[in-house]
Amino acid sequence: MKIAVIGTGYVGLVAGVCFAEMGNAVICVDTNAATVGKLRKGQSPIFEPDMDELLARNIAAGRLSFTTQAREAVDGADLAFICVGTPPRDRDGEPELSLVYGAAKDIARAMTGPLTVVIKSTVPVGTGDAVEEIIRRTRPGAVVSVASNPEFLREGSAIDDFNRPDRIVIGVEDLRAQETLQRLYLPLCAAGAPLIVTRRRTSELTKYAANAFLATKISFINEMADLCEKAGGDVTELAAGIGLDERIGRAFLNAGPGYGGSCFPKDTCALLHTAQEYGVPLRVVEGTVAANNARKHRMAIKVMKAAGGSVADMKIAVLGLTFKPDTDDMREAPSIPLIRHLQRAGARIAAYDPQGIRQAREHLSDVDFHDDPYECARDADVVVLMTEWDEVRTLDLARLNRVMHTPTMVDLRNIYAPELVRRFGFRLAGIGRPATPRPEAPLPAPPAPIRSERELEAIVVK
Ligand code: UDX
């Protein structure tokens, strides 16, 4: 099939390379000439495992190319995917849709034959209707179908998520769009991916519902962690205890510093905005967002407590800055408010991240950035484990202790077993874990099993 992909951000670029890898002829469009120039040379603007290899292979095979001109990509295409950004317009969460509508107009002007336009950008319910109207108004009489096909990929495992999705959701209003998308996704469905075919509005809502539900799981476990800390429980064991119930599931029950990234914060707020428009209260999602916002302040208090009540004039080393590992993305990373809070409280901040420093510089000032965790922690009073990069998971704790001024660790991802960290001489504060270690004394031995009836009788007689 011949496919045009409008927008080469995370969603567009991953879809573009993966569709090409499936054997389609793909042309990706971006208005940014510098980005297109780099992509033509096989240089990815985003850090994503396997991306460089896939780019190189498909460009060399002539299946994948890049342009700044929508006309070049849409001319003769069977499908045009809209993958442009939908950033929040303001604080109340309403997404900015001008790029989506602009792409719809560009496609309408450029199309030369029957076309299925597919919205992959995360858009509020009803956007498909508006896009269809724009195209029909711009090109009266055009043979066009508009479909919704949300993307559920995660940064850092985006290509794998695309190729092995838990499900593919397509929202269609006519059979032609349904058949075209079914044909496109046939290889993934043949490999086992379930395909949900629904109407356009349901599909648009499904994307927001999925992200809001996952965000809710995270806020739920984070609040349980707070309760564990006060009441004397261990949230990691609690998560295992509830997660093995298949109805709950263990995924997304890792307590931490709060969710960040380009999706959960934006999409939960956008969903609340939609709910308000329709006059439907979404109290659970409201609670999720409020809990995540409150967490930013709470994490700073946790570091201050671990430091003995104040961080004034102390050196705090933050290991990991990105909102999660295997990405260079700093959008809504919880490290940003944490560092700002600590700076306001008088701390000097040193920070380490394997990929995120370039982007972190755009969000943070007066931070001493390092590309080595031990240099970062040299003479520090507190080390804060912020993002669970492999480099942070596999620290040489003896070496870390040696370089620090005082060995205090705040492990906001519960990476290390508390007993281990304490054995290496650290004072430790984790998330939702008891302040005191488990008693060393072994549990009392269980009574010996009763074997014979005579033994049983002897007990009863006693
Ligand atoms: C998310 C969704 O997972 C994906 O389906 C959607 O398409 C886009 O949004 P992403 O933002 O890349 O993907 O990252 P994800 O791995 O979901 O993590 C989001 C945030 O939640 C991170 O800050 C992460 O640290 C946090 N998180 C995740 C937790 O705090 N605990 C968990 O158990 C899981």
Image (spheres, rainbow, N blue to C red):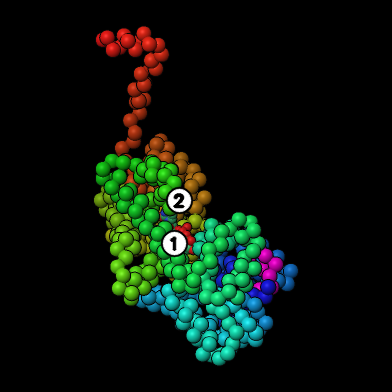
Would you place residue 97 above or below residue 339 in this image? below
Q: Amino acid at mark 2?
A: Ala
Residue 281 relative to residue 127: left or right: left
Q: Quadrant of residue 41?
A: bottom right
Where's residue 210, x and y in %? 44, 62
| Camera sees residue 68 | no
Horizontal and vertical percent for residue 140?
55, 91
State the residue in front, 126 or 289.
Answer: 126
Q: Is residue 20 magenta?
A: yes
The reply to whether the residue tagged 1 has its Cβ within 8 angstroms of ligand 1 is: yes
Name above or below for residue 356 compared with residue 372: below
The tag earlier along the polypeptide, 2 or 1, is 1
Query: Is the Cβ of the residue at disc 2 closer than 8 Å to that at disc 1?
Result: no
Q: Residue at x 70, y 65 (%)?
A: 57
Secondary element at image label 1: helix
- 140 to 279, vertically: above or below: below
Residue under label 1, please give it: 210
Q: Is residue 255 magenta?
A: no
What is the span of residues highlighted in magenta in the rendered image?
A: 17-26
Q: CA distance from mark 2 to mark 1?
A: 13 Å
Q: Residue at label 2? A: 251
Quick check: is the Cβ at mark 2 less than 8 Å away from ligand 1? yes
> What residue appears at the point 39 percent right and 48 percent down from the top-left corner?
411
Residue 310 spot, x, y in % from top left: 27, 53
Nearer-the-camera pick, 155 or 451: 451
Tell which of 385 and 19 is nearer to you: 19
Q: Quadrant of ligand 1?
A: bottom left
Residue shown at 41%/64% (left/top)? 209
Q: Residue at x 68, y 70 (%)?
A: 24
